[in-house]
Image (cartoon, helix red, strand yellow):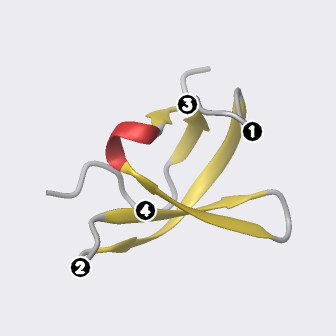
Amino acid sequence: MQTFNVGDVVQLPQKPWLGVTGVVISHDTKRDQYLVRIGASQQVYFKADEIHLFEK
């Protein structure tokens, strides 16, 4: 079940990205993981329980 949408701004609660924000750029339905772009050149896959929607 997809929890986040492409374009959602999320906060990364785990080290080494503790407190960093990123943008969901795709959802891998086969692995049920979200590809999050962090900064200009880094992209990392996370499971839904590893990220949270960013609240201003």
* Quadrant assignment for the C terminus: top right
Question: As shown in the figure, which amino acid type bears the numbered disc 3?
Answer: Phe
Q: Are marks 1 and 4 in contact (CB under 8 Å)?
A: no
Question: As shown in the figure, which amino acid type bears the numbered disc 4?
Answer: Tyr
Please name the residue that numbered disc 2 is placed on.
30
Where is 46 relative to 13, above or below?
below
Please name the residue that numbered disc 3 is placed on.
54
Camera-side mark, 1 or 4: 1
Camera-side mark, 4 or 3: 4
Question: As shown in the figure, which amino acid type bears the numbered disc 1?
Answer: Pro
**Distance (Cα) linking label 2 and label 4:** 11 Å
1 or 2: tag closer to the N-terminus: 1
Where is 51 relative to 1, above or below?
above
Quarter occupied by residue 44: bottom right
3 or 2: tag closer to the N-terminus: 2
Other-residue count near label 2 (Cα within 10 Å), few / some / many at <14 / 14–19 / ≥20:
few
**Distance (Cα) linking label 3 and label 2:** 25 Å
* Quadrant assignment for the N terminus: bottom left
Q: What secondary structure is found at the residue carrying circle 1?
A: loop
Where is 20 relative to 4, above or below?
above
Q: Residue furthest right?
A: 40
Image spot of residue 29 (x, y percent): 24, 75
Other-residue count near label 4 (Cα within 10 Å), few / some / many at <14 / 14–19 / ≥20:
many
4 or 3: tag closer to the N-terminus: 4
Question: As shown in the figure, which amino acid type bears the numbered disc 2?
Answer: Lys
Please name the residue that numbered disc 1 is placed on.
16
Q: Are marks 1 and 3 in contact (CB under 8 Å)?
A: no
Where is 11 relative to 9, above or below?
above
Q: What secondary structure is found at the residue carrying circle 4?
A: strand
**In the image, what residue occupies the spot 22% across and 57% down?**
2
